[in-house]
Image (cartoon, rainbow, N blue to C red):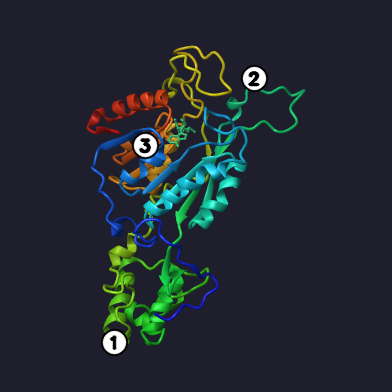
Amino acid sequence: MPSVLCSCRRKVPEPETGTPRWQTGVMAGRPKATPRRYHLHHGDAMDAYENWSAPDLIMVDGPYGVGGFFGDPRTPEPLADFYRPHIDAWTRLSKFSTTLWFWCTEVGWANVHPLLDSAGWDYVETVHWDKGIAHIAGNVNGKTIRRFPIANEICVFYSRRLEFPVNGELVQAKHWLKNEWKRTGLPLRQANDACGVKDAAVRKYLDTGWLWYFPPAEMFQRLVDWANSKGDVGGRPYYSLDGKMPLTGSEWASFRYPWNHENGLTNVWQEPPLHGKERIRGTGTRHAPRVHNPKAGVASAHLNQKPLRLMERIIGAATNSGQVIWEPFGGLASASVAALQMGRVPFVAEINPDFAALAEDRLKEASSNGASAETE
Ligand SMILES: C[S@@+](CC[C@H](N)C(=O)[O-])C[C@H]1O[C@@H](n2cnc3c(N)ncnc32)[C@H](O)[C@@H]1O
């Protein structure tokens, strides 16, 4: 294939396993998830990833660099080194349609963002969790504090960059779409005839700037059919990733993550910190450097337990029923509990045996309506 002229070319990275990055998920034939089950790994997530089904969504709520649990560094600088091998695994084992949600402090995330970006994860937006005044009430000494009290956390949303190899280089999907059409030798305007539109195909689907639209399955299929039946015979197949068969419209559509929009919901979420019934109480075991003499049945079992409501929002927006959720840093497995309740299939790891045992209890309870366990 001739090379694509664009400013965004970069070398195809060598795959660490036999699976090239663009042959991901469905195409790479990873193990299929069994519906209505949870998979809890008692141990390091790094030892679990290879056995998990390809993720549709990865909920990352790991170290923040604030000493929030034993193993969380006390400053954010070491976070990049901590997350590097995890990011490599997420990238290698995910699909084009996988989304990644990264909970952290702002400065913790700032240390990790460059790694995610260079691994091919595109920043989409930041969700702000405003915990409100209740979060700091009674905890601020106005005489000694020299900043505004912090009452928020962020969760940064990433999607996989859609890139395809052309002559040993990865190019963005929009450049690949246009390049493939050019290879057919057909005039650009025939893309409009192929799609049965006046000018929208050239203007939207073959644009290589910010006006580019992701062609829907039907339109992609029309472009493929036209290119492969009327394009230069010597260059066929067109719109193929393996050089043998063109992609189908539904394969193309599967490269995009689902989005279930809820009117009125923005990226700023007001939600009080967890109290009451949902907050899991501990056994009296000390579980964080900042916690001293926790009282059994009174102190929180985990400082970082997330509200199920926030997890449900993310999972409900970016996945559909039956899809696979990864929660590599489980804690009390809030994302996985929400996932189970919503008919998704969670894969979760927790390295601390006390937290893992509590997570197991929650997952069992959440699954009492039909899901079954698989503990590793
Ligand atoms: C921020 S907490 C997660 C809290 C969780 N979202 C919840 O709602 O309960 C991070 C957790 O990751 C666990 N962890 C840290 N490194 C890990 C690793 N390599 N593999 C598995 N779990 C890990 C810690 O023990 C900790 O419980």
- Mark in the foreground, 2 or 1: 1
Q: Earlier in the sequence, mark 2 or mark 3?
A: 2
Say which quadrant the N terminus sits in.
bottom left
Where residue 136 sits: x, y (%)? 62, 25
**Quarter of the view holding residue 326:** top left
As drawn, 357 above or below 322: above
**Residue under the point 61% across and 39% down:** 76
**Residue under the point 42% across and 49% down:** 90
Mark 2 vs ligand 1: CB below 8 Å:
no
SS label for mark 2: loop
**Residue under the point 61% across and 28% down:** 133
What crowding class fits label 2: few (fewer than 14 Cα within 10 Å), some (14-19), or many (20 or more)?
A: few
Question: Of residues 146 and 165, which is closer to you in this image?
Answer: 165
**Residue found at the very far right of the displayed protein:** 143
Q: Which residue is mark 3?
A: 348
- Marks 2 and 3 sit apart, C-alpha to C-alpha, by 35 Å
Say which quadrant the C terminus sits in.
top left
Where residue 349 sits: x, y (%)? 38, 35
Query: Mark 1 is on which residue type?
Result: Val
What crowding class fits label 3: few (fewer than 14 Cα within 10 Å), some (14-19), or many (20 or more)?
A: many
- Marks 3 and 1 sit apart, C-alpha to C-alpha, by 49 Å
Question: Of residues 81 and 66, which is closer to you in this image?
Answer: 81
Q: Which residue is mark 2?
A: 138
Query: Mark 3 is on which residue type?
Result: Val
Residue 233: mark in rendering:
1
Q: Is residue 327 visible?
A: no
Q: Is residue 146 visible?
A: yes
Describe residue 106's horizontal placement relative to residue 49 as left or right: right
SS label for mark 1: helix
Where residue 354 sits: x, y (%)? 41, 23
Where residue 123 sits: x, y (%)? 52, 54
